[in-house]
């Protein structure tokens, strides 16, 4: 029986393990926290990702390794890759960990990106703002996610506050200044590439964030076919350039009919959770198929779907489970402010059925503000 090792024991590892059970797979999770939620479904090695003793134990017990988050040290991934197959490859992981390397790759591939500049000193920050203009966003090059490690600069007088907030990290994880994008829509293309180079993608998804954390995802996004083809073409370019194996998400801004690449997530992605119920093959199963060298599954969509993220604490499951199209996912985490603790997906055969279900769930959970932007999109003329 094949054992898949997962570096990182969060909800993504948990859902990978759940999706791999029908394939007859076993799993081993490695995490720094003994109470990682994936450990409820798979045995775990507890240790620092740079601890070679812990890594050696992990490697000795698995046939192939993958990740559930992108901040695993790339040198640890390379150490493992010298001993066992690791997918995606450490080079791809390293690019995705560094916003400067990531944006540079996009530009080299001809994929439009917001203006950006590396920042190492306060003087460089001032010069970069003068060139790029305000508003803009100062970000850490590494270790940022869900809105962390960012400071929005609305005007040049915000320089001191921005440098006070992030300047100390310039010499450790590095900083990058990015032009602010006044986008009309936030989109993501979730795609998968197999060991043999086969490439597939799911329908383009529209996303809404609150305080930098994903709040809701709608699929299909309902954009023009030319825009969807462009998004998929961008994703394919990235996957082939990195010799990528597995599932990834390319996050995009749409402004004036043009797609701008925001970032690459080298793993299964929050905006693809709807694929569990809304696609012939979920992102989780296809990731496992890819890293094991198995044929990829069909990514066609089954109707219409909306994923709602639960952040901080879980609401009552009753309204969602009372819907014929409702699906509930509790990650088994302790409630904590800003923490992703679960999600729900509503999947319907028709758009009108999805609208009605969202209205009922939003009202019963008193989450009207969360579902409102999705409902406005669904009701808008196409």
Image (spheres, rainbow, N blue to C red):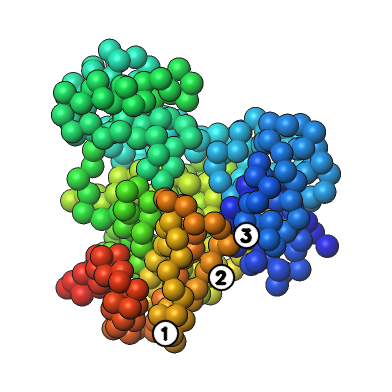
Cβ–Cβ below 8 Å for labels 3 and 1? no
Cα distance in 3D space between marks 3 and 2: 17 Å
Kind of element beneath mark 1: loop
From this view, report whether residue 142 is shown above or below residue 125.
below
Residue 227 position within the rendered picture, expressed as x and y whole percent measured from the top left: 29, 58
From this view, report whether residue 192 is shown above or below residue 367.
above
State left or right for residue 6 relative to residue 199. Answer: right
Cα distance in 3D space between marks 1 and 2: 22 Å
Which one is in front in this view, the residue at disc 3 or the one at disc 2? 3
**Residue ID for mark 2:** 281
Q: Identify the image quadrant of residue 282.
A: bottom right
Residue 161 position within the rendered picture, expressed as x and y whole percent measured from the top left: 26, 25
Which one is in front in this view, the residue at disc 1 or the one at disc 2? 1
The total number of labels drawn is 3
**Residue ID for mark 1:** 323
Which residue occupies 54% across, 42% down? 70
**Residue ID for mark 3:** 14
Kind of element beneath mark 3: helix
Residue 2 position within the rendered picture, expressed as x and y whole percent measured from the top left: 79, 59
State left or right for residue 19 relative to residue 60. Answer: left
């Amino acid at each position: 029986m094949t054992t898949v090792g997962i570096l990182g024991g969060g909800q993504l590892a948990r859902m990978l393990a759940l999706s791999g059970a029908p394939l007859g797979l076993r799993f081993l999770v490695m995490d720094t926290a003994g109470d990682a939620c994936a450990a409820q479904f798979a045995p775990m090695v507890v240790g620092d990702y740079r601890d070679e003793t812990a890594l050696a134990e992990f490697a000795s017990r698995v046939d192939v390794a993958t990740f559930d988050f992108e901040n695993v040290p790339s040198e640890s991934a390379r150490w493992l890759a010298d001993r066992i197959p690791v997918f995606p490859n450490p080079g791809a992981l390293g690019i995705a960990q560094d916003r400067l390397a990531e944006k540079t790759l996009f530009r080299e591939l001809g994929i439009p990106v917001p203006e950006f500049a590396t920042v190492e000193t306060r003087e460089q920050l001032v010069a970069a703002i003068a060139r790029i203009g305000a508003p803009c966003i100062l970000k850490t090059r590494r270790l940022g996610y869900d809105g962390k490690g960012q400071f929005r600069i609305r005007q040049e007088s915000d320089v001191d506050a921005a440098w006070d907030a992030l300047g100390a990290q310039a010499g450790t994880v590095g900083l990058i200044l990015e032009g602010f994008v006044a986008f009309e829509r936030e989109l993501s293309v979730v795609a998968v590439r197999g060991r043999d180079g086969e490439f597939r993608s799911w329908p383009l998804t529209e996303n809404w964030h609150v305080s930098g954390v994903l709040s809701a995802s709608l699929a299909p996004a309902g954009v023009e076919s030319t825009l969807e083809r462009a998004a998929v073409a961008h994703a394919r370019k990235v996957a082939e350039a990195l010799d990528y194996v597995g599932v990834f998400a390319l996050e995009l801004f749409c402004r004036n009919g043009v797609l701008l690449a925001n970032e690459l997530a080298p793993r299964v992605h929050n905006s693809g959770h709807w694929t569990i119920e809304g696609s012939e093959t979920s992102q989780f199963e296809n990731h496992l198929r890819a890293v094991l060298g198995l044929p990829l599954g069909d990514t066609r969509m089954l109707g219409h779907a909306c994923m709602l993220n639960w952040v901080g604490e879980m609401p009552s499951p009753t309204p969602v489970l009372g819907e014929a199209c409702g699906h509930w996912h509790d990650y088994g985490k302790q409630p904590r402010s800003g923490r992703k603790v679960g999600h729900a997906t509503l999947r319907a055969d028709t758009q009108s059925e999805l609208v009605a279900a969202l209205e009922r769930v939003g009202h019963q959970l008193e989450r009207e503000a969360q579902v409102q932007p999705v409902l406005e999109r669904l009701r808008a003329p196409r």
